Image (spheres, rainbow, N blue to C red):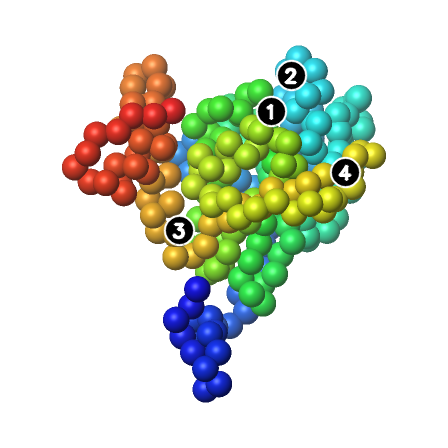
Amino acid sequence: MSARLNEYGQPVGDPVPDWTARPAPARVAVEGRRCRVEPLDADRHADDLYAAYSLAEDGADWTYMSVGPFGTAADYRAYVTRVTQVDDPLPYAVVDLRTGKAVGTLSLMRQDPSNGVVEVGSVAFSPLLKGTPVSTEAQFLLMSYVFDELGYRRYEWKCDSLNAPSRKAALRLGFTFEGIFRRAVVYKGRSRDTAWYSIVDSEWPHVGKALREWLSPDNFDTEGRQKRSLSAVRAADENPGRTHSGR
């Protein structure tokens, strides 16, 4: 609760001096050590993405998505062509720099430049991307773009409350759980309760520092295995001088 009071003795929020609307997310590319996040394009990415998604054993990765699975490469290309015609959601492809191929997508959506709020969503990571350092770097690159370049105040993550992997990923990346919006969405003929998570600008320096430390080449051995988990890195930053372990 805020301790600030207005002239009527009512509690009010902290002032935001000199606030101005922020730029909307743009069709720009951001590159890290392992991947590049760039505007999704049907001609450049659709075939690689369909091939990457087809490596999955079944269509389970699409259960909690509003679209998919896609039966043919043509179906997926038509979908990509359609979603790239608008700016919100603004879709990006994740390109693995080792292979030069797109291996997943994510979008900046529900954009609110006036208040400096945006959501990352439509995260569709293929088997080539899931659970790899590249997937973490892709998320970090988009977070850094939103906070450090665009100057946003709030970065959101929402998912079906039953989507345990997505909820686990949000917490691992440093998002804070905010609650459940009941019966918030109808999709694929089902009702969805939506779990809400966020990172705000005051948290970003700590969240970003932990991600940068985890992604550092020094944190991986010659076989590409992590030396410290992201949770351990974050805990060590919170409690300097102590040794932590985790997953």
**Residue under label 2:** 56
**Among the 4 quarters of the image, the one containing residue 225:** top left
Residue 152 placement (x, y as % from top left):
49, 59
Residue 153 placement (x, y as % from top left):
48, 59
Q: Residue at 63% x, 21% y: name it.
A: 52
**Residue under label 1:** 126
Viewer-side label of 4, 3:
4
Viewer-side label of 3, 1:
3
Name which residue type carries label 1: Ser
- Lower position in the chain sequence, tag 3 or tag 1: 1
- Circle 1/circle 2 CB separation < 8 Å: yes
Q: Residue at 31% x, 31% y: name it.
A: 232
> 59 left or right of 232?
right
Q: Residue at 30% x, 37% y: name it.
A: 235
Under circle 3, the secondary element is helix
Name which residue type carries label 2: Ala
- Lower position in the chain sequence, tag 4 or tag 3: 4
Q: Nearer the viewer, residue 196 or 135?
A: 196
**Residue under label 4:** 191
